[in-house]
Image: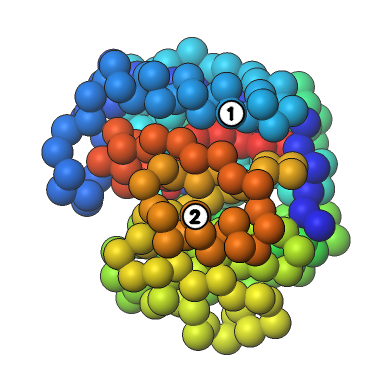
Amino acid sequence: MSDTFTRALARPPAASFAEGLTTADLGAPDLEKALAQHAAYCEALVGCGLELLHLPPDDRHPDSTFVEDTAVIARGAAIVTRPGAASRAGEVHAIRTALAGFFPGLDEIQAPGTVDGGDICEAGEHVFIGLSHRTNEEGAAQLARFLALQGLTSQNVDIRNVPGILHLKSGISYLGDGRMLVIEALAEHPAFSSLTVLRVPRGEEYAANAIRVNDRVLLPAGYPGVEELLRNAGDTLLTLDMSEFRKMDGGLSCLSLRF
Ligand code: CIR
């Protein structure tokens, strides 16, 4: 099984969206299209039974639609992160305010620690923490202590030398029932040896960022190999066009905080 979610926090892309950080080299995103894709994403979460909490767009922070990076929520507790990219540091203020009402003991990653939520992959009682160019060892250690207080074990997975992925969850997704969707470059990693590893076909790496939301799996549209893999595994899929977010290195998981 996997966690049951009842709510999600999301924030539409801002007018400054195209000024955000990216390594994708896929051209500038079209804001109108991104807004439509974001609306469809929110609708899909509502279709999965979630209540959607919307934050207003924030022009001062072009990457602020990627709310997942600003907090980690586990077992009824939450911690606000310290994003690893300087341009994203200010995103946490609105998130802190939004989450405080739900999580009275809201914790915070402290300097010099940095954590991006995209590096945190919860898999049942165990959590994988990506050491990346955004999440450093100090941040990972603080997060591990927070998780331990919630009764969760964790381990680090160093992805700093894995090409083509920004965050750990750009390359893996936990789908529930002991199953992990994993790109080839991480498929043999000893961290995942006790899990059922579903290998992402080459060329479809972007679809490694999927999300299990209650009884469905949300998947980016246009990746037939991964679709087939998951349908054969018995998953109920919902595919979403993510083209404009992909241009900014973002995937499905980044666009919401689910709890
Ligand atoms: C960034 O570079 O921070 C954003 N352009 C993309 C963040 C994607 N977030 C995620 O994968 N969790």
Q: Quadrant of the N terminus?
A: bottom right
Image quadrant of ligand 1? top left
Residue 81 in sight? no
Sequence-first tag of 1 and 2: 1
**Residue 144 sits in quarter:** bottom right
Which residue shows up at 30% across the image and 22% down it? 33
Q: Is residue 252 left or right of 174 when viewed as pictured?
A: left
Please name whichever residue, 223 or 177, is drawn nearer the observer in this view of the structure. Answer: 223
Which residue shows up at 77% across the image and 31% down it? 6
Disc 2 marks which amino acid? Glu
State the image coordinates of residue 98 (x, y, percent, origin top left). Answer: 64, 22
Q: What residue is pinned by disc 1?
A: 44
Which residue shows up at 52% across the image and 83% down it? 189
10 Å neighbourhood of mark 1: few (<14), some, or many (≥20)? some
The residues tagged by marks 1 and 2 sit, at their Cα atoms, a distance apart of 17 Å
Q: Which residue reaches farthest top? A: 56
Please name whichever residue, 179 or 144, is drawn nearer the observer in this view of the structure. Answer: 179
Q: Which residue reaches farthest right? A: 151
**Residue 31 sits in quarter:** top left
- Tag 1 near tag 2, CB within 8 Å: no
Disc 1 marks which amino acid? Ala
Q: What residue is pinned by disc 2?
A: 227
Q: Is residue 50 left or right of 202 when viewed as pictured?
A: right
State the image coordinates of residue 94 (x, y, percent, origin top left). Answer: 54, 22
- Say if 146 sits above or below 141 in the image: above
Q: Is mark 2 within 8 Å of ligand 1?
A: no
